[in-house]
Amino acid sequence: MHSRTVFFVSDGTGITAETFGNAILAQFEMKPRHVRLPFIDTVDKAHQAVRQINHTGEVEGKKPIVFTTLVNMEVLKVIQDGCKGMLLDMFGTFVHPLEEELGIRSHHRVGRFSDVSRSKEYTDRIEAINFSLAHDDGQSNRDLAGADVILVGVSRSGKTPTSLYLAMQYGMKAANYPLIPEDFDRRQLPPALEPHRKKIFGLTIQPERLSEIRNERRPDSKYASLVNCRHEIAEAEAMMRRSGIRWLSTTTKSIEEIATTILQEIRPERLVY
């Protein structure tokens, strides 16, 4: 059972409110129920949100926690005046004091994705996602010179989700290549990667965890056997050491931690936030 309901209220997508709220809630040993209320961009929608929040509090007997990133002051006032939950207004807490300190009024725009048609950063992000999809799992050798990073590792070590996260979050063009038995027999990196060695970053994983993951996909196969996983991991790590490739284990790390480590090591000149 959840111990408390948390609402994320925004006049945009709510991604900022949810990201910030979850970062704070992670400091507490609790499993709240999440309710997303995006696109609350009119007074009428704000009143509906208030009714939902207050009804939840009455049913559960506990004040809901409400994170908001509302820009429209008229809409925000409805929430502030009517909401019986614990209201945490991010813009009121952080943006307004910064306006006073800097002597500059903020844009007060709705969401990070507003007016995307004019945003070069957004266009770059889409291009990076397309690049990462086209270069997933060694599908293409074309334009590897345009990659910001090339991830290598055995199958199911976390290359694809990491590549897509880097593209979506940072606009990085991330290719990824699986290391396969043929590479281990040659004791060399795939030939297509050799000219781009400085951009390569390796991912590894504990054999026991790899076997679990592979068994979900191909149960009771040689591919998923612990013996085979141990062999592949040992060969991949030996190859990365011989080639002077930086690498880390994904076994206990989140995608965010993996991506942050890669950014620190690769240090691309161009980053999109």
Image (cartoon, rainbow, N blue to C red):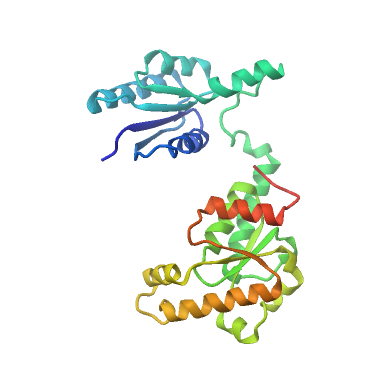
Image coordinates for residue 147, horizontal then vertical, percent: 70, 60
Image coordinates for residue 44, horizontal then vertical, percent: 40, 19
Q: Identify the residue at image location x=32%, y=24%.
A: 63
Q: Identify the residue at image location x=41%, y=76%.
A: 224
Whether residue 218 appears in this view of the structure is yes
Image coordinates for residue 84, horizontal then vertical, percent: 34, 18
**Quadrant (top left, top right, bottom left, bottom right) of the N terminus:** top left
185 up-or-down from 164: above or below: below
**Quadrant (top left, top right, bottom left, bottom right) of the C terminus:** top right
131 up-or-down from 32: above or below: below
Which image quadrant for residue 142?
A: bottom right
Image coordinates for residue 244, horizontal then vertical, percent: 71, 70
Whether residue 104 appears in this view of the structure is no
Q: Residue 36 versus residue 22: which sits nearer the camera?
A: 22
Which image quadrant for residue 91?
A: top right
Q: Identify the residue at image location x=76%, y=72%.
A: 195
Left or right placement of residue 53 versus residue 18 in this view = left
Left or right placement of residue 242 versus residue 157 in this view = right
Total marks shown come to 0
Q: Residue 78 versus residue 88: which sits nearer the camera?
A: 88
Q: Which residue is at the far bottom?
A: 185
Q: Residue 72 versus residue 207: which sits nearer the camera?
A: 207
